């Protein structure tokens, strides 16, 4: 039986601790309820082949789960033959989302690597990775600005992300693992502060859903994204102070 | 400059030729405009480990592009280290979509493999693969019914799929490759005959989009899916006659 | 029991349809009886390392079978650890055969990739791939000539290929899969229009064979190759017209 | 120039935080100075092939560094072809060390997986992993005892580990990364509370060293190990209380 | 300029030293001129999946070159992504040749692994591997007979192998590496004592060759094979004495 | 029961045959009792990336066991997914040991590859590989000196290596496989002619050992290393004569 201890339109506690890695140009430990992800940003002074000699930079992400981030131990990716399809899907989503709010020209010929390593998974690790990824990318940008490596902030607008779904006909924001398991519909939404949508991915795990269900979900999701962005902006303001920017 | 020779809400010519493989339990060559995909269904009398001893079957898909399905030759997947992320995303999408309209119990302990091999790619190969996959899966089901391997049709409802997007502020159904390249928004929709949504994946390649844009796109996409289903049902009716079912 | 519907020294119907791929510099669908192979030629403006700075070009082939080209589904190569030995043998044979009739200097510093993808396998796919490979290579040459990329035709002489064998003491030309399965001797022959041999590969699958058996097989095989070359030359003439050459 | 802020025979601050993972049978975050490793123990109810039907259990370890645990970003192991030699050396060392103080019969037919994931590397991550590994293994043992899965504690004696070396003729305990880089001799020592040696690995990175140097190092290292064991035992006592054992 | 120090129809000195490995059921060091191969036979009490429950055994071969068996160092196979095509071709040839003279039923449900490791390569390593493979397979058979593991000798007839070719219009038996490099035609022949052919593989490296050239080559090759079998039989007689059979 | 036919502080017969490979810049077959390793040195005119533009050279080693070097056949490394951890440990040890006595500046921008391939393993193959590696490296150095490729001998001091251990309370030098299997302590020692230690690796396979045991082992090991160096120096003197140096 499904039972939720918070309101259906409420997200779990979202805590973002920055400065957790002494080498990275940006780093945070993000906790979304019991999901925990370590995220770092690394600036590299080169770009992928297809961008050489273009004056553009690149933002890309890698995602991985620690073996015991899951209820029972998962085989370590480096010990398997192939990268998991889910892993690839998620890291492509993170990279795409961040690039959607980035003016790549302002990065110069640099790549920013976003590494998301899940310490503990309790649902929502992909949105937590996007959120954490945005924060550490922002910090890396502030770092580059303060070091005069770049002149203008390439980030066009702040973004947030949230997962949601329909569970036993309830429209629930920010699914935990146990809710996700029994959800009929599973949706991930990435959107900007101005309520523009960057990514929407909805899947019928049980029965397909109507257009009106989808509308209701989007409404709910956009509200969730705004709550996320609120938390992010507080963190970003602290980072700006740290870098005097 | 972008110029379209058909109406914005029109799909390209969709031709599905069945019976193209003499070994497979289901097979077709699907042409969506200039995109061409060979699709086969193979029935195997076993299931993945997690379904053993469950009375359930499984439907899964593999997707691959021939090296010269693309404008310039692509390195063959089997000669690369890892499966491409895009490939994995697409084959997961195909499998998930088909399972969404399948009562897996009715398959018994069998796996149906859907193999989608793109001969020529001109946009929309993932939706072509879903459509072709649905047809060959249907044929495999008819085959199993006619052979008395299964008793009841496990397919709950017919599905269709279409890609669409926003190109220079135009809402276009069924994007060709050249349109896809310059699209600001790219959306894939999988839905049922009763207009229920199975999968929605929307991405802002350029500027993020509003909720109202998204609504308009969904409306347009659902219409496209219905057109696709019309074509499919003609094919399915012919198959039913072939198998006397 | 073995029963053949055509004469022992007769090859199956050989149909070569060109122009089946809109991107490739050469393409065909070749049907040898029920064996079907899609073949494309792709011109790349670079050469393998060992040919750099030599004024020579290169011709190389890749061969692959679609999972359901076979009676029961075969695991896709890209999902296996290593390339199959048989696959490697065949693609090396195709490349070597084509290079044997090519003046590599006339290609300039270019590589022509021949991709052979088997849609349906019913015996003889390796010779079908050589034949189809020769056709698409020829078309790519015509293309380069018509585009003034090269000045002289690098193809020295036309080649053909055929498989044959001894089945229950019958010397049979062009083995189908069911014949191949029970053949005591299995031979593949690649030769030129002037009856010169490029490759001969003979294997005793059952009892070893005498020198006189081998002689008889070679005689039979050379006749088969000439029949193949006849079909090819009709196709090539049509291609020459298409390219006004 | 080399400068140390603590005495040569002093180890860095060693902090072991347990209970950091809600799924694992044992878990800790270990900090040795600025080196940080997340360690978990996972109990699996089967053993490697060579131990089947032997009444023995197994303890094994996997070690990995997060991409940005290092000064500049390291390529993720799962994206490389082969496991790094250093990684394999370290994980074999951890497993061997733990098994040296374990009566494998007391584990029953179970495998305990020790996963060590380095968040931040500043020298000594292999000894930190052994220490953390010992702690989480101990917790997993307490868990199994409290759950009555096993009857007797398989751990024979407590162990500790430390790295040390010779830097500019100074004998230094517990090398930081900057010291390690310039060390002439690098030594890792794993030993028990009763001062017995489990593993010794000494390498001349610069000039080879004399037997008397080695003796002095061992003396120093054994002292360091005792200090480590003191910290460990406090943690273990707390764990025992937690599990009422 | 090409110059040969022995007659064109003469093979190089062929020396087979047996008993060079204390663990293997059969072993030899074979020297063909300056080519040197270590060959062992290993008997395993199981068969590949497709032979399970058939009362048949299997003979299979693996071939590898030590990195410095070649003029300049070759990258070690285990450090490359894929097995070399040439390697696979050769090991398939060795296995097929040996199975052609073996009654697999007489082996029982056993696999004999033939491992061929080239210490030094100076042309003809594939035929040296077949010869050495035949010797060590014979020894393994004698071993199994003497140990009463099998009752009847499964080897039907003795086989030999030789390479030959056309170099500057000379028909040369047993090509050395320098001859092989400039050969217009390259042929490998495996045949039995009764002059039956098991495998013939002929390749035009330069100009294609006529049927009459091929006939002359086969004649020459069969003579070479008989010389090889003479040497082998002396070795086999000594082995029979060793095993009192 | 354990029984030794030679004194506890005696090493097995050590025979080093040089000049066994006609291509390599240095080569030997080393026999330590019944352990046999083929070792070659290959000089390459480039260095690893991290040494480019440094005026330094590099020495590196690869180690591999032939499949039937072991009592029962081992799967060939190139047919497995990953390099064995033990293999990597050993080859890193060999390379590190050789570099410890090498002035890399004197090599110029060259890499010397040491390939160690075990023909037969009866304990001590890693020390045999270090010894053989030192010999062939020395020969390659003499070769480069005689060819005026380098001006000064980069080898600073001669080194030797030996394994030893504690078996049933006996301190044994140079363990054979059967002794190694039952050893309580296993130690590998690499040292120089002047009794300086390069590498020490000691492992408690059974009970941990005391500091005084370790001291006794080191004493014994250093004696063994001197005996090894005596044998080496005779070989080196012969090599010097061969190269007139």
Image: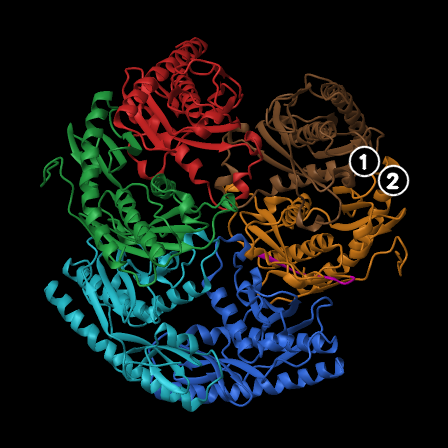
Chain colours: A brown, B orange, C blue, D red, E cyan, F green
Task: Chain letter for mark 2, please.
Answer: B
Using residue F30 as the reference point, say whether residue B202 is left or right of it: right
Q: Which residues are magenta?
A: B33-42
Q: What is the secondary structure assignment of the residue under circle 1?
A: strand
Q: Is residue C175 left or right of residue A226?
A: left
Query: What percent of the width, then of the height, locates residue E69?
Result: 35, 61
Q: Position of residue E141 (x, y in %)?
A: 21, 63
Q: In the rendered view of the protein, which quadrant contains the N terminus of chain F?
A: top left
Q: Mark 1 falls within which chain?
A: A
The spot of residue B30 in percent (x, y) is: 72, 61
> Which label sits in the foreground, 1 or 2?
1
Residue C8 seen in the figure = no
- Relative to the observer, which residue lies in front, F156 or F228? F156
Taking the image as shown, residue E229 lies to the left or right of residue C110, namely: left
Q: What numbered label is drawn on residue A197?
A: 1
Q: CA distance from mark 1 to mark 2?
A: 10 Å
Give the position of the C terminus of chain F as an image quadrant: bottom left
The front one of F110 and B2 is F110
- Circle 2 packing at 10 Å, graded few (<14), some (14-19), many (20+), is some
CB contact under 8 Å: marks 1 and 2: yes
- Indicate which disc residue B105 carries: none
Q: Looking at the picture, does residue C218 appear above or below residue D88?
A: below
Residue at the spot of label 2: B213
């Amino acid at each position: 039986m499904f039972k939720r201890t918070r309101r259906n339109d409420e997200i779990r506690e979202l805590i973002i601790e920055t400065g957790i890695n002494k080498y990275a140009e940006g780093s945070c430990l993000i906790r979304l309820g019991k999901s925990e992800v370590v995220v770092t940003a690394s600036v590299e002074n080169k770009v992928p082949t297809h961008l050489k000699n273009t004056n553009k930079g690149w933002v890309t992400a890698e995602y991985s789960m620690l073996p015991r981030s899951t209820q029972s131990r998962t085989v370590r990716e480096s010990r398997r033959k192939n990268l998991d399809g889910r892993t690839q899907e998620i890291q492509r989503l993170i990279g795409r989302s961040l690039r959607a709010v980035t003016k790549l020209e302002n990065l110069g010929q640099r790549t920013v690597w976003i590494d998301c390593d899940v310490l503990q998974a309790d649902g929502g690790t992909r949105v937590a990775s996007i959120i954490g990824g945005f924060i550490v990318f922002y910090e890396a940008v502030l770092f580059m600005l303060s070091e005069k490596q770049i002149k203008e902030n390439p980030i066009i607008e702040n973004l947030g992300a949230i997962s949601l779904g329909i569970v036993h006909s309830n429209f629930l924001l920010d699914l935990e693992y146990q809710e996700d398991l029994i959800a009929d519909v599973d949706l991930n939404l990435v959107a900007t502060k101005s309520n523009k949508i960057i990514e929407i991915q909805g899947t019928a795990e049980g029965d397909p859903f109507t257009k009106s269900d989808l509308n209701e979900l989007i409404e709910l999701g956009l509200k969730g994204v705004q709550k996320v962005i609120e938390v992010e902006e507080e963190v970003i303001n602290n980072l700006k102070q740290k870098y005097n920017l």
